[in-house]
Image (spheres, grey):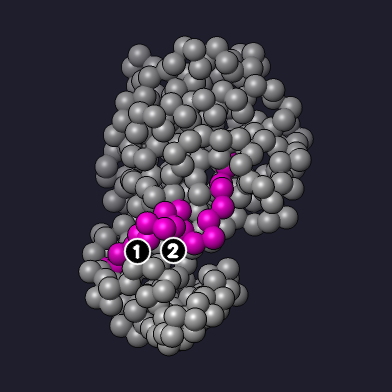
Amino acid sequence: MTVRLTRPLAVALAVSALATLAACGDSDPAPAAGGVTSVAGVQIKKDQALYDLLPEQIRKAGKVRVATDVPYPPFEMFVKEGESALTGLDYDLGQAIGGKLGVTFAFTPQKFDGIVPAIQAGKFDAAMSAITDNKERQQVVDFVDYSQSGSGVLVAEGNPAKISDLDSLCGQKVAVQAATNQLDLLKKHQAECAKAGKGQIEIQTFPKDSDAQLALRSGKVVAQVLTKPAAGWVAKTADQGKSFDLVEDPAAPGGYNASPNGIAVGKQVPGLADAIQKALQSLIDDGTLTQIYAKYGVASIAVQKATKNAAVD
């Protein structure tokens, strides 16, 4: 089974950055008076027409039971280590969708490899956990796709080496975590460097992303290649956003080799996926989706249209 494209950062990184988000007052959205939900500074009201689309069992329960694998920054995190309160991109998006639908998206931690089986068993109605949409999983769940994410490039603050895309890494020293898709991406790009008559990428591998970031901090490399959501999160939160920048390549807004991530919805709850899809589209149309993603430094991976089961392989 295909794994998520994103990779978890060190828990310490997530915890150190969460204090900043929590201070904003919108990291733990909750319904306010009049059925209004506040998420990422946006006030979201129930849409009765969307509520009416929900399956009767969801309307009766007043909630959608959602599985999530925590921690997995920036998608899902604990507000404080050792406590159960959640935050993160998926959590905030779930509260926003729930606000539109007029029901609660109740998140419960679940180990990643057990999420789909738990949905099949009826323990959960859905899952939001940066799950890669693919044909294999579509056989047992439906996906409402909400992001396109792949590999990104992290550089030092101010981008002193003027890195703009993968081609500009040719002839440069670049850090990457060992045994990752990002390492494979760099190795494959060596042929493009040669074709362009440029020098080879001097690839330096490290056991952990955090080790690669130390090399970038010290100037031993000009860039680090890692998953784009992780790169955006590090750029936004490390040293209050003063140490790193995320390279934005217009030709690859979701990152290199991007694939869709989706909300997995149980097929045993007919109509739920359609209602979630329409609520997500409403959040896209009014700009809320982009605002939630921007809160976590990854606005560029947001989709422009809510689709179902978009993966083709």
Tell me the magenta residue range: 243-264
Whole-percent x and y of residue 88? Answer: 43, 46
Asked whether, in this view, residue 153 is left or right of residue 106, the answer is: left
Along the viewing direction, whichever of 96 and 251 lies nearer the viewer: 251
- Say if 153 sits above or below 104 in the image: below
For the question of whether residue 19 can be seen, the reply is: yes
Of the two numbered discs 1 and 2 on the same chain, state the one appearing first in sequence: 2
Whole-percent x and y of residue 220? Answer: 35, 85
Q: Secondary structure at mark 1?
A: loop
Q: Check disc 2 and report the residue beneath it.
A: 152
Q: Amino acid at mark 1?
A: Val
Q: Secondary structure at mark 2?
A: strand
- Say if 106 sits above or below 261 in the image: above
Whole-percent x and y of residue 194? Answer: 49, 84
Q: CA distance from mark 1 to mark 2?
A: 7 Å
Along the viewing direction, whichever of 18 and 47 lies nearer the viewer: 47
Q: Quadrant of residue 43?
A: top left
Within the magenta stretch, is there residue 260? yes
Within the magenta stretch, is there residue 185? no
Q: Quadrant of the N terminus?
A: bottom right
- Say if 94 sits above or below 69 in the image: above
Mark 2 Cα shell of 10 Å, populated few (<14), some (14-19), many (≥20): many
Q: Amino acid at mark 2?
A: Gly
Residue under the image location 31 percent in, 77 percent down: 217
- Say if 30 sits above or below 256 in the image: above
| 1 and 2 marks in contact (CB < 8 Å) | yes
Residue under the image location 50 percent in, 49 percent down: 148
Q: Check disc 1 and report the residue beneath it.
A: 247
Q: Quadrant of residue 309?
A: top right
